Amino acid sequence: MNEQVSKTSLALNKRRYLIGISRFIFFTTIAVLIFFIPFQINGNTEILFGYIYNFLIEFFGIVGIWIISALILGNAVLGFTGKFISKEGSRLHAFYKKDSKMYIPIYFLGALYSTLYTLQVSIPAFNGPAAIVGPGTGELMSGIALAVMWVIPLGAIFIPFFVNYGSIDFVGTLLQPIMRPIFKVPGKSAIDAITSFLTSSSVAVLFTTKLYNMKYYTKKEAAVITTSFSAVSIGFAAVVIDTAGLMDHFSKVYFSSFLVAFIIAFIMIRIPPLSLKKNVYIDGSEQEAEARSTETYSRNTLGIAFGSAIDQAADSNEFFSEIKKSLMEGLAVLPKVLSMLFAIGVSVLILAEYTPTFEIIGSVIAPFIQLLNVPDAALIAPSLALGLAEMFLPVLYIADMVGTLDIQARYFVTAVSMVQIIFFAETGAVMLSTGLPLKLWELIVIFTLRTLIAMPLVAIFMHLLF
């Protein structure tokens, strides 16, 4: 009898192992093909994920802009109703309950901006305010919003391939001895960084949010990861570097910025406001001290990583239910994200385009840049503050001066802008909309600190490389 039970148990364990390893290999392969492997498509080298959402943007055309406006307007109306009118306990009230009261006017402001821009591009006789619908404000913001509108649901569909079928556990176990002592975060956070660099910073934020909601990350870890590793993708970095006239030095600019970003992360994690975040999970439960212990590599590390991945893949729920759950979560936050993007993004772009706000900030920064012996300090100083609005703006600010600016000055602006990470035309708005444990004032402080820390670091590389 005991021998029969033993054989049955062995057969079940073998079956579980085969299911786990087959799922792990199959879904990891698909995820790597989607997110990380470049393909030649129509003569261009592209990542499949980027090709898919760009195809959808072109396919829907102006209809996509109308969809955005409908989502933002609907979010404003439902947000007001859910926050102030719906009864306690209703689904609508529960959905908007955690939103600050300040968010409601922001939602309506986003609805105003998006509606005016949609009418501008849809009705020839309509002429909206240039400050709102112009190429440097509403038009720029619309392009970003169209990308985000498809990035979030597509990311929600494909992210479970990593999270639910062992990839995250495999990478996390392998990199825990590095990530935990240096950055005080789990090894699996390395996937967030890789995803951001190769695809989109919005996908990285969404990735972090999902793991935070699943209690993989504490509030502190989620805040650290999303503000430290959600960097600009390599594809967009190429556009930025080319605009600054530095394409001949792409490797030097990109990889030095990559290194600076990780040095900044090492510092930011150890100072407020990130250092003050609590190591508790989304439900308030405490993280055990063992989870923060530093592990070391051994001959068993690879085997443990495989074992962890296979267990996760074997225990995962039915595939389509996982995709449906993840997609519903992504679609739920999409209207809030788009509302924040338009409201905050366009407002800051208006300040940048039509007021001397950033020039004034630049005049304060200029003496510090001069101390670092950066050429043309007075000319480039205002550009660094523009990164708060949109990552591309600092380089656009100096684009007309590329022919006359010293190469060191161009490198300085480009590298700093690539490591600031918090810009409200995309990552900042996504961070505020997805329920991550970050407040508006914290993001502004983090942006300021990242910029101040980046400047001397980038100056060192500038003097070494150029």
Image (tube, rainbow, N blue to C red):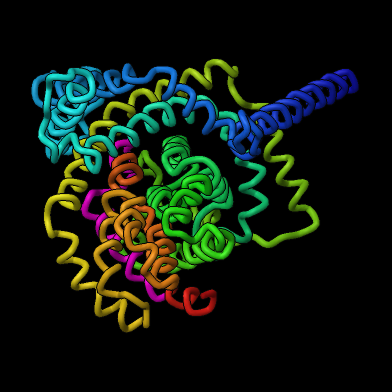
Q: Can residue 439 be found in the magenta stretch? A: yes
Q: Is residue 367 above or below residue 181?
A: below
Horizontally, residue 156 falls left or right of residue 403, namely: right
When asked about the image quadrant of residue 57, the answer is top left
Q: Residue at x 52, y 16 (%)?
A: 321
Q: Can residue 9 be found in the magenta stretch? A: no
Q: Residue at x 17, y 44 (%)?
A: 347
When asked about the image quadrant of residue 124, the answer is top left
Horizontally, residue 383 falls left or right of residue 129, namely: right
When asked about the image quadrant of residue 386, the answer is bottom left
> How many numbered marks have been drawn onto this rendered protein structure?
0
Q: Residue at x 21, y 54 (%)?
A: 441
Q: Residue at x 26, y 21 (%)?
A: 71
Q: Is residue 207 visible?
A: yes
Q: Nearer the viewer, residue 408 or 27?
A: 408
Horizontally, residue 99 falls left or right of residue 62, namely: left
Pinpoint residue 15: horizontal percent, then vertical percent. 79, 22
Q: Is residue 78 visible?
A: no
The stretch in magenta equals 431-456
Q: Nearer the viewer, residue 131 or 345?
A: 131
Viewport quadrant of the N terminus:
top right
